[in-house]
Amino acid sequence: MALHILGMGHAHPDTVIDNKFIEELDVGTNEAWILEKIGIVTRLSTLPLDYIKETRNQDPRAAIEVASMSPTDLGAKAGEMALKQAGVGAEQVGLVITNCCAPNQTTPSEAQRIAQRLGVRGQAYDVFSACPAFALHLNLLNSFKEEMLPDFVLCVSTATLTQHVDYNDRSDGAIWGDGAAAWVVSPRHRGKLKVLETFFAADPSRADAVVVNTYGHFKQDGRAVRDFSVRQTVRLIKALEVKHSIDWTKDLFVGHQANKTMLDQITNNREIPESNHWHNVTQIGNQAGAGAPAVISMHWNEIQPGQRLAVAVVGAGLSWGSALFEATDAQR
């Protein structure tokens, strides 16, 4: 069975958090430090700037009330775009699987809420692992026999983690943005991206390294997670390079959109030119599992037949995964 991605979508809120705003919060940081350590210029948030300035989001329950969009809003918007890009109607979708590491509700599932918004009548359930969700969803679908899958599957990753940021923390406040991404997968219909390989793994013994409390703040062991992420991403890329003879003069790389300096470490290690390294973290921030697929969606029309696209994503769990695609000449 060969899976294909037929179309992709992305969605982001409108509020821009720039480095000057974070510096003016007076929490012990400045724009120079942010650019040197994190490499992010702006972030997109569902929270009003006045709310962040006045409360520093000390009670995340209040953030849900003032937010301009929910994870469901973002996920449905990205899903609608992906379906349109794929030329697939909601009535044709037989399955929706969704990743949301910070849902506003636990029941019904995020997938069921998004499916309802879009008018999908097929099955819908959540499969989530925060940041590596893109690899997780594809690896899961790749494990099924073809006859077990419907013609079209809609995958969605959505996150509003700025609603869980303590804006008195100089690092966390500079990292996160909100967003969603979606992709339409088929085991029978050709699409722009043919899935050549998928991989996903996790180490639950390190589960406490990254935590998002339902009504609390995001917390992580930042240095340990960063070191793990760089090492693991390099390993994932090396494995794809060896097996598939990737040519970085024409092939493309998309990593987990954690921060730009981390991505620079990875691309420098593997000698991937910046022109073939696609990213959006500098302008949107870390969007958890939505980051990497949103990057591909934003560059969808630039992908050329014959190019291969290597994706390596890491994050909470601790978990990690990869996917390799080959661009086809399929038009939808």
Image: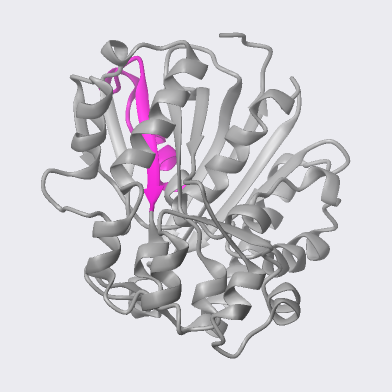
- Magenta stretch, residue numbers: 135-159
Describe residue 276's horizontal placement relative to residue 9 as left or right: right
Give the quadrant of the C terminus.
top right
Please determine whether, in this image, residue 269 is positioned above or below residue 157: below
In the displayed structure, 326 sits above or below 287; it is: above
The structure residue drawn at horizontal position 68% and vertical position 49%, both measured from the top left corner, is 279
User: Measured from the top left, where is residue 58 in percent x and y?
Assistant: 32, 79
Across and down, in percent, residue 288 comes to 46, 57
**Residue 188 in view (yes/no):** yes
Within the magenta stretch, is there residue 151? yes
Tell which of 172 and 144 is nearer to you: 172
The residue drawn where x is 57% and y is 72% is 174
Quadrant in the picture for residue 48 = bottom left
Residue 142 at what x, y percent from top left?
A: 41, 34
Q: Is residue 143 magenta?
A: yes
Which residue occupies the foreground of this view, 276 or 105?
105
Residue positioned 28% across, 70% down in the render: 60
Q: Residue furthest bottom?
A: 28
Q: How is the image coloured?
A: one colour
Q: Nearer the viewer, residue 298 or 13?
A: 13
Q: Relative to residue 46, is residue 193 depicted above or below?
A: above
Residue at position x 55%, y 38% in the image: 197
Dividing the picture into quadrants, the one containing residue 47 is bottom left
